[in-house]
Image (tube, helix red, strand yellow):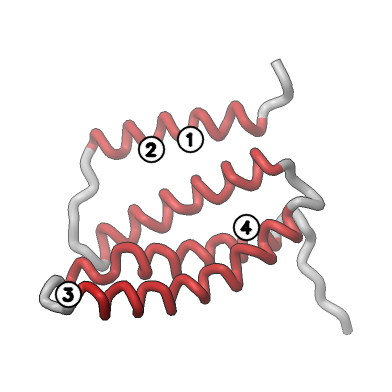
Amino acid sequence: MTFSIPPQVAPILLLSASNLFMTVAWYGHLRFTDRPLPLVILISWMIALLEYCFAVPANRIGYRAYSAAELKTIQEVITLVVFVGFSAIYLKEPITLNQLVGFAFIGLGAFFIFRAPI
């Protein structure tokens, strides 16, 4: 039995994994401010390499089903969803109403990217 993920779904799954790694690479060190910056940079780069292993195939596969602008929009929306969860759970930062309103405006922008041409 062969299992394949449709090109409409695969980039969403791959970009979700990619964003988990990238969020950890960019923000995970904020709980370890006592570590030397060169060490943090090296570890972040190692994590980011894993991120690229998901992001590049996501865009290659996704370009069969989506335009470049749509792929970028998907990536940005996933980034916000992952970041909100990471910020609240890992960094223990509260999610404010201002942030939610700002993210809603970004979501509105995403709506227009996927809407039929005006």
Give the residue pinned by disc 2: 103
Q: Residue furthest left?
A: 34
Q: CA distance from mark 1 to mark 3?
A: 32 Å
| Label 2 secondary element | helix
**Residue type, mark 4 in image:** Ile
Do the numbered discs 1 and 2 sit on residues whose CB atoms are within 8 Å? yes
Give the residue pinned by disc 1: 107
**Residue type, mark 3 in image:** Phe
**Residue type, mark 1 in image:** Gly
Q: Is residue 88 above or below residue 31?
A: above
What's the residue at 45%, 70% (across, down)?
21
| Label 3 secondary element | loop
Q: Which mark is residue 12?
A: 4
Crowding at mark 3 (Cα within 10 Å: few <14, some 14-19, many 20+) = few
Residue 72 is drawn in which quadrant? top right
Indicate the position of residue 102 as horizontal and vertical percent values: 34, 33
Give the residue pinned by disc 3: 32
Residue 85 is drawn in which quadrant? bottom left
